[in-house]
Image (spheres, rainbow, N blue to C red):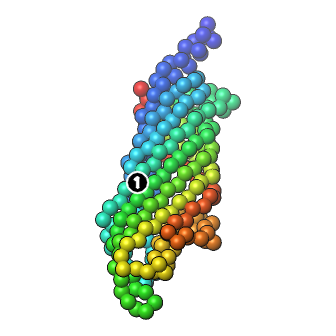
Amino acid sequence: MAQEEKVVEKAKRNDYKNVAKFNVSSQILYNNALLFGFERVIKPRQSLNISGGYIEFPISLKVPESMSLREQRKKSGYNIALDWRFYLASENKDLAPHGVYLAPFLSIHHFESDRDFTYTDSTGAMKNGTMNNRISFFTIGGQLGYQFVIKRRFVVDAVLFGPGVTNYKFNVKLNGNLNEIDKGTIAGKVIEALREKLPLLDEIAENKEVSGSGVQTFWSVGFRYSISIGYRF
């Protein structure tokens, strides 16, 4: 009888198989963000979790004194991520979606912005132009997390450690009364300023070349971490 009661109690704790979530940590990491998630329990100790939404890249950039950036005319961005969660039986007395989990994941970040700028070249001539920046990160990795379930309905989901391998792509397109030397110099400085916004990335990519078309692409380490709150139904 006691064993049957335990089985029934576990089933009750697992009767809500869906979780809708709101990412609260994105409000700290980005200037403007609105990310949501949805988790679906597919087996007693497994679930699929998808998240995504709108984000903007931090807009303030440290550029050389020879450049003056004006207010952005357009800015946008998005993030999409998918992870397959395995809630560890050895660590959790409760079934999914409660407790410690391991999960392989895929994640895509994309940012875009347009802005005007003024550039003073080596002769002292002042030139005006427009700039389009596109930044993309594609990450494959694995994560360790813990999801708290409070009163069966509410959850706090914490991705504690999410290392991965990331493809970084920076693309700067310039228009205006600029020669090819000016374009190469400006693109390199802008990409350097963009990299400085991401922890450790500037040192990793210091010796990576920027192509003549203003593109820099490379693979390196990446990380994923987040905190979300949610509701089960």
**Location of residue 211 with respect to 232 vertically, above or below:** below
Q: Residue at x 36, y 80 (%)?
A: 177
Note whether residue 183 is visible. yes
Q: Could you say which quadrant of the image residue 126 lies in? A: bottom left
Q: Residues within 10 Å of mark 1 (few under 14, many from 20)?
A: some
Q: Position of residue 231 (x, y in %)?
A: 42, 33
Q: Nearer the viewer, residue 50 or 86?
A: 50
**Location of residue 212 with respect to 154 vertically, above or below:** below
Callout 1, which amino acid?
Answer: Gly
Note whether residue 203 is visible. no
**Location of residue 205 with respect to 31 vertically, above or below:** below
Quarter of the image where the C terminus is located:
top left
Q: Position of residue 145 (x, y in %)?
A: 58, 41
Q: Residue at x 45, y 67 (%)?
A: 172
**Location of residue 168 with respect to 44 vertically, above or below:** below
Q: Residue at x 58, y 55 (%)?
A: 167
Q: Could you say which quadrant of the image residue 94 lies in? A: top right
Quarter of the image where the N terminus is located:
top right
Q: Position of residue 44 (x, y in %)?
A: 58, 23
Q: Residue at x 38, y 62 (%)?
A: 113
| Extreme-right residue of the structure | 90
Disc 1, SS: strand
- What residue is pinned by disc 1? 77
Q: Nearer the viewer, residue 33 or 93?
A: 33
| Extreme-bottom residue of the structure | 123
What is the total number of numbered labels drawn onto the structure image?
1
Q: Position of residue 226 (x, y in %)?
A: 51, 48
